[in-house]
C-alpha cells in the first residue's frame, strides 16, 4: 500500500502554490482549487516551473525529475 495521498489546496497564491509544490515534490497527487477573485492573475504552474528551475540551477533538484 502506498503512502502517497491525493491533496487538494484551496488558493493559488504564493502560499497555496508553495504548499502544492512541496506536496508534489514528495510524489503526492495535487489539485489546486482557486476560489478567489484573483483567479485570472494566479499562474501556479508557471510559478512552480520557475521555482523548479531555480532549484535545479542551485543543485537542489535534478532536472531529470521534472
Image: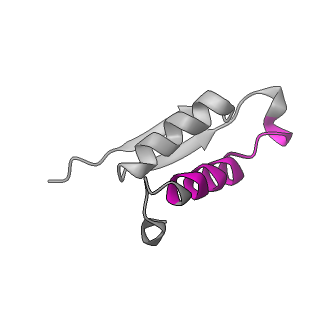
**Residue 11 shows in this picture:** no
Q: Which residues lie in the magenta part?
A: 39-56
Q: Position of residue 41 (x, y in %)?
A: 84, 39
Q: Position of residue 22 (x, y in %)?
A: 45, 41
In the image, 62 versus 19, the foreground residue is: 62
Q: Is residue 5 left or right of residue 18?
A: left
Q: Position of residue 62 (x, y in %)?
A: 43, 64
14 is higher (above) or lower (below) than 55 = above
Q: Main secondary structure of the magenta part?
A: helix
In the image, 64 versus 27, the foreground residue is: 64
Q: Which residue does the image show at 60% across and 49% down from the upper left? A: 51
In the image, 40 versus 56, the foreground residue is: 56
Q: Which quadrant would residue 10 be assigned to in this image? A: top right
Q: Which residue does the image show at 44% across and 72% down from the upper left? A: 64
Q: Position of residue 42 (x, y in %)?
A: 77, 40
Q: Which residue does the image show at 43% across and 52% down from the upper left? A: 60
Amino acid at each position: 500500500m502506498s503512502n502517497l495521498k491525493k491533496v487538494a489546496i484551496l488558493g493559488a497564491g504564493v502560499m497555496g502554490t508553495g504548499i502544492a509544490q512541496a506536496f508534489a515534490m514528495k510524489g503526492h497527487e495535487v489539485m489546486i482549487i482557486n476560489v478567489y477573485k484573483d483567479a485570472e492573475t494566479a499562474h501556479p504552474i508557471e510559478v512552480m516551473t520557475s521555482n523548479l528551475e531555480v532549484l535545479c540551477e542551485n543543485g537542489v533538484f535534478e532536472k531529470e525529475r521534472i
